Image (tube, rainbow, N blue to C red):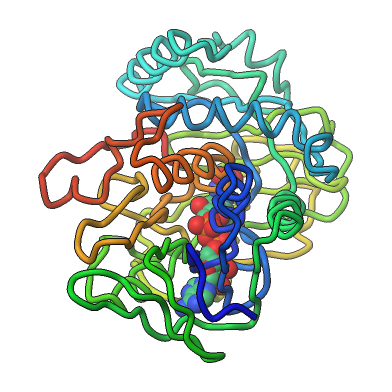
């Protein structure tokens, strides 16, 4: 077990593992990833696995597109089956202002090479014949969007990183971050101290409390989100796209012979409550049946809650924090982090090694933007 490392990464979710892999791929493998639980068991395990390119900001579209290219080749490249299903994301729009915004977003996505398109109600019926459309103006669809198995993807990265010499230390909690003369010196853990001049925080929803160990405050709040799966259910085909009623955030997609579904609660207070709220489950089911009446005959098998890691502009903090020197962060993905893991890995690895993210300009998501008043709001948050 190492007591010094060139780089320490805090957290072995999709971000910690993808960044460790990308660094090792670039020849920097003297890395310790410290994980208090087990690999991929944090927010990454709670995610619906959705991957989409339909975003409203150029940076997010580029991050998503670069990641989709990796998801498409992941099974061969990492010898890991991730259950990639590219059945598309279909957004249903019921409000004129929303529709206008989505038309603008589609133009941006198409300019960046994404095959998304505006769809009229008759095409929506062909894509998903099971949704009620009387209040729907139109929608957008991208056939390359879909979903994957988040745990297998994270394990694929972790195995590949370990094979190149990265140490991933599970069941070890970071309890302190050393800072001397304005620079990080390493981390303290419940299993001893590890010295390093470079620490990357990838602690998901816990990134704010972990950053406080270094005396800095990151604007990342935990917000409970619940997901549910039905018992096996074949009244709707397993070929349907991920379908989203944008005005409520209701979504559903086929999963393991049944369907996975959820809906964002606009009144959900920030905080660490991880219980499943039966009342919200009933409200979600009611909304689901209203939009897709065939679900009346489905029954819910189980539900779970996890935390979105929400920032004031629904976008992550990527890069060095400034003070203390040597401390970088990749966190605050506001509910769309899993899908961006591959691109974030490459961008952060390049930034750490050469001071610049070569393939994609991630400077709009620099941690200092909040203090500068230069927010980069993402509109397409589910
Ligand atoms: C219900 C739900 C549905 C979602 N659906 C999607 C989706 O469809 N698509 C999508 O892209 N995203 C989705 N997300 C968001 C996605 O889960 C996150 O953005 C992403 O997984 C963040 O990955 P991460 O590696 O940053 O965090 P995590 O996976 O949380 O990893 C952080 C790790 O840090 C560890 N850690 C924390 N504190 C310490 C410490 N002190 N010492 C050591 N280790 C520590 C944790 O144990 C954890 O394993 C969803 C989230 C939720 C809750």
Give the mark count: 0
Q: Position of residue 359 (x, y in %)?
A: 45, 26
Query: What residue is rendered at 76% in x and 56% in y?
Result: 163
Q: Position of residue 72 (x, y in %)?
A: 73, 28
Q: Is residue 280 above or below residue 191?
A: above
Q: Is residue 113 above or below residue 317?
A: above
* Left or right of residue 363: residue 260: right
Q: Nearer the viewer, residue 172 or 226?
A: 172
Q: Nearer the viewer, residue 157 or 103?
A: 157
Q: Position of residue 333 (x, y in %)?
A: 43, 50
Q: Nearer the viewer, residue 328 or 54?
A: 328
* Left or right of residue 368: residue 315: right
Query: What residue is rendered at 77% in x and 40% in y?
Result: 254
Q: Which quadrant is the N terminus positioned in?
A: bottom right
Q: Is residue 55 visible?
A: yes
Query: What residue is rendered at 35% in x and 14% in y?
Result: 104
Q: Is residue 306 visible?
A: no
Q: Nearer the viewer, residue 148 or 21?
A: 21
Q: Position of residue 342 (x, y in %)?
A: 59, 40
Quadrant location, ligand no. 1: bottom right
- The residue positioned farthest toward the left in the image shown: 372
């Amino acid at each position: 077990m190492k007591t010094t490392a060139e780089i320490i990464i805090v957290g072995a979710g999709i971000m910690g593992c993808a960044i460790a892999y990308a660094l090792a791929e670039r020849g920097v493998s003297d890395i310790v990833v410290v994980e208090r639980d087990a690999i991929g068991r944090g927010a990454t395990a709670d995610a619906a696995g959705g991957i989409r390119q339909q975003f409203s900001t150029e940076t997010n579209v580029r991050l998503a597109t670069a990641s989709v290219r990796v998801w498409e080749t992941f099974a061969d490249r990492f010898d890991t089956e991730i259950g990639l299903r590219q059945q598309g994301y279909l957004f249903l729009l019921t409000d004129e202002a929303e529709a206008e915004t989505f038309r603008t977003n589609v133009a941006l996505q198409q300019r960046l090479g994404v095959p998304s398109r505006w769809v009229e109600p008759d095409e929506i019926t062909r894509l998903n014949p099971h949704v009620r459309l009387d209040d729907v103006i139109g929608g957008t669809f991208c056939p390359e969007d879909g979903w994957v198995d988040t745990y297998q993807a994270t394990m694929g990265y972790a195995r590949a990183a370990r094979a190149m010499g990265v140490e991933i230390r599970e069941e070890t909690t970071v309890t302190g971050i050393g800072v001397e003369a304005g620079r990080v010196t390493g981390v303290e853990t419940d299993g001893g101290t590890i010295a390093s001049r470079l620490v990357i925080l990838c602690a998901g929803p816990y990134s704010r409390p972990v950053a406080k160990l270094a005396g800095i405050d990151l604007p990342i709040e935990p917000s409970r989100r619940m997901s549910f799966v039905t018992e096996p259910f074949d009244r709707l085909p397993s070929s349907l796209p991920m379908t989203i009623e944008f005005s409520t955030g209701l979504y559903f997609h086929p999963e393991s012979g049944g369907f996975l579904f959820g809906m964002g609660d606009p009144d959900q207070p920030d905080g660490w409550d991880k219980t499943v709220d039966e009342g919200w489950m009933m409200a979600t089911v009611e909304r689901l049946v209203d939009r897709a009446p065939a679900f009346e005959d489905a029954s819910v098998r189980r539900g779970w809650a996890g935390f979105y890691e929400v920032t004031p502009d629904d976008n992550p903090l990527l890069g060095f924090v400034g003070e203390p020197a040597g401390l970088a962060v990749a966190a605050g993905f506001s509910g769309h982090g899993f899908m961006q893991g591959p691109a974030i890995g490459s961008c952060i690895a390049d930034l750490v090694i050469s001071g610049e993210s070569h393939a994609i300009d991630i400077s709009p998501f620099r941690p200092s933007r909040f203090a500068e008043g230069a927010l980069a709001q993402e509109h397409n948050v589910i």
